[in-house]
Image: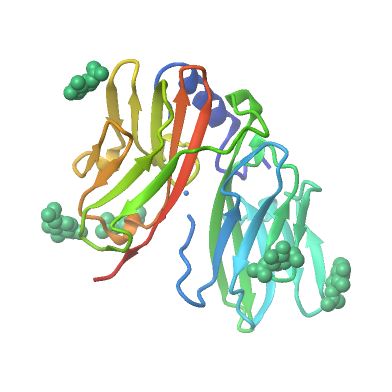
Amino acid sequence: MMDCVALSCKVCTSWQGLLLTVSLLTCWLIPTTSQLTIKSVPPIAVEGENVLLFVHNLPKNVKVFSWFTGARVLKSCEIATHVIAINATVIGLSHSGRETVFKNGSLLIKSVTSKDSGYYTLRILDANSRPKIIRTEFFVHSPLLGYKKHLTPSQLKIALVPPRVEENINVILWVFQMPKKLQAFAWHKGVLPLDHLKIASHSFLTNSTMLGHAYYDRLTVRNDGSLLLLNVTKNDTGLYTLRTISVDLKLEWAIIEVQVNSK
Ligand SMILES: *[C@@H]1O[C@H](CO)[C@@H](O)[C@H](O)[C@H]1NC(C)=O
Ligand SMILES: *[C@@H]1O[C@H](CO)[C@@H](O)[C@H](O)[C@H]1NC(C)=O
Ligand SMILES: *[C@@H]1O[C@H](CO)[C@@H](O)[C@H](O)[C@H]1NC(C)=O
Ligand SMILES: *[C@@H]1O[C@H](CO)[C@@H](O)[C@H](O)[C@H]1NC(C)=O
Ligand SMILES: *[C@@H]1O[C@H](CO)[C@@H](O)[C@H](O)[C@H]1NC(C)=O
């Protein structure tokens, strides 16, 4: 299963390493009317929680659907296949014993661990047997990362300005209630704290900001954590995650969804 999921242990460890030093540190499709979409609920979980990969608008003519760990459709990464006509589920090689497939397409994963972090792929076959593939992702914080269960929910909030975003405008991801005494914060596209998905990070210890490659010429990071993103394109659609780490290693995070509409 580890080979299938996008976040390998190596990545998790290097992320923890990064976290302990200075710098801290997606494919969620956006619903438009009756479009097929999936969401992870919650997109960021803590070990031991259940995660539901929630399928909206599964087409009526779907005959068979399959869930896979990872971003690709590989037999060895198959969790389960469900045949609707006969209401039968066939378990795949990547089934860990904790997954339940529902006939509406959704997948429940119980008692997640950090190893479950990563991408999940749904393939549906309709009456014409034309496959349609759609992905989601979630991240599971391990208790090692300083997050204690039953902690009061994060106060951290993000607002999108303007709330309706069109192509080629500038947008602000405005941060409220940033925790005090931070050592660092980081923004990622999507919910996975992977280096290649990093938008920006800031260390208060060294007062230095680093920008992700794709953002060099069109991003400003403000001291309060807010982002100014210039000239957005449809490619900027998706989830944005802000993570903070305080000097006493307490983590907080907040997620916002940005939909870039055509003019
Ligand atoms: C699908 O079924 C599961 C289990 O019954 C339920 O929790 C979930 O809300 C359903 N999803 C939709 C989109 O109806
Ligand atoms: C489908 O199968 C599940 C168990 O595999 C059962 O609980 C459920 O009632 C069945 N649904 C229908 C509509 O037959
Ligand atoms: C951090 O660096 C910026 C310039 O890069 C400077 O304007 C700011 O005053 C510095 N802040 C602190 C607290 O040193
Ligand atoms: C914004 O991006 C478009 C391409 O997506 C480009 O044609 C245009 O010149 C850019 N505008 C500015 C002000 O950078
Ligand atoms: C959007 O992303 C795709 C793939 O990542 C890339 O091929 C394409 O050029 C991008 N388009 C823009 C306008 O940046």
Instruction: Tell me the quadrant of the picture where the C terminus can be found.
Output: bottom left
In the rendered image, which quarter contains the N terminus? top right
Asked if residue 162 can be seen in this view, the reply is yes
Q: Nearer the viewer, residue 113 or 125?
A: 113
Count of marks overlaid on the render: 0
Is 39 left or right of 83, judged from the image as shown?
left
Q: Looking at the image, which residue is at 34% across and 20% down?
A: 204
The residue lying toward the viewer, choosing from 15 and 129, is 15
Vertically, is 225 above or below 108?
A: above
Quarter of image, ligand 4: bottom left
| Residue 62 falls in image quadrant | bottom right
Front residue of this view, candidates 224 and 192: 224
Q: Residue at x 28, y 58 (%)?
A: 162
Q: Up-down: is 61 above or below 44?
A: below
Residue displayed at 32% across by 45% down: 174
How is the protein colored in the picture? rainbow
Q: Position of residue 16 (x, y in %)?
A: 53, 24
Question: What percent of the width, then of the height, locates residue 217?
Answer: 18, 42
At which x and y percent is residue 237? 37, 58
Q: Give the quadrant of residue 91.
A: bottom right
Give the answer, above or below, for where 21 lies relative to 156. Answer: above
The front one of 66 and 220 is: 220
x and y, in percent, of residue 205 in the image: 34, 16
Residue 71 visible in the displayed image: no
